Image (cartoon, rainbow, N blue to C red):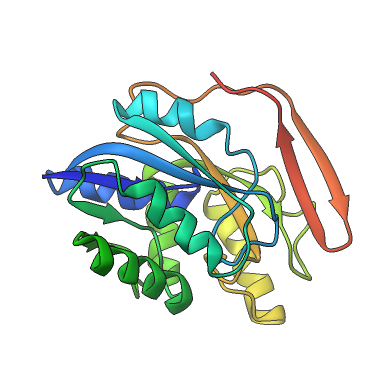
Amino acid sequence: MSWVALTSGGKDSILAVQKAIDAGMQVTHLVTVVPENTESYMFHSANLKAVSVMAKRCGAEYVEIKSKGVKEQEVEDLEKGLVTLGVEGIIVGAIESEYQRSRVAAVCDRLGLKLFAPLWKMDPLTLMHEVVSRLDAVIVVCAADGLGDNVLGKKIDEKLIDVLLSVHKSRRIHLAGEGGEYESLVLNAPCFSEPIHCSELKFSYQGLRGEVMIDRFW
């Protein structure tokens, strides 16, 4: 049975891919929806060029789906892009967002596909410890009060979890960033044949939003 993974290259979707592979599932495609709208309800937009390299590292085919990132229409764009792939199931890294999970589940129902969401309702702190132990990931977007230079561009490790816990307690952010408080990028995972290499990290801030921009991945 072949599976497609929806991924922006972040910790949650790549950890879901890793768990699928651990379970003996055949992940044949990594699919990225590229939204024009950086405020997309469904999909991230930062450093998506990394995903094609990740697909090569995983021995999977890379598929890019363009979308204007308009609410609900972007789900239709995803569905149209999946129709021709010939897979039997979709892997997602949703943790608590019913908005995201329910829409992908509806796409699965319409296309007759199975849904694998191994992180669903997982305890956020347990998840973050697993990210630290299994992945090499950095924070590439922060978009919440209390997050900035203290996390942006930094590797997710036990020290950074402590920082996130502190902000979680004082500002009530979601520890794993499920509410869009931050986004991450995975540079290495057990399923990668070798780490992802990248050019210099460039930092940009606009209001509460900080972003690491990376020009090239290989």
Position of 115 relative to 121 (above/below): above
Whether residue 200 is visible, yes or no, is yes
- The image position of residue 206, as x and y in percent, is 88, 55
Residue, x 44% and y 49% (percent of image)?
132
Residue, x 59% and y 53% (percent of image)?
44
Q: Is residue 35 left or right of residue 190?
A: right
Q: Nearer the viewer, residue 84 or 191?
A: 84
Q: Nearer the viewer, residue 199 or 101?
A: 101
Position of 109 relative to 206 (above/below): below
- The image position of residue 161, as x and y in percent, is 56, 60
How many marks can you see? 0
Q: Is residue 32 left or right of residue 155?
A: left
Residue, x 31% and y 49% (percent of image)?
83
- The image position of residue 127, as x and y in percent, is 39, 62
Residue 172 found in image quarter? bottom right
Q: Nearer the viewer, residue 141 or 44?
A: 44
Q: Is residue 111 left or right of residue 55?
A: left
Whether residue 123 is visible, yes or no, is no
- The image position of residue 123, as x and y in percent, is 38, 73
Residue, x 68% and y 21% (percent of image)?
199
Position of 89 relative to 197 (above/below): below
Q: Looking at the rendering, in which quadrant would you find the N terminus?
A: top left
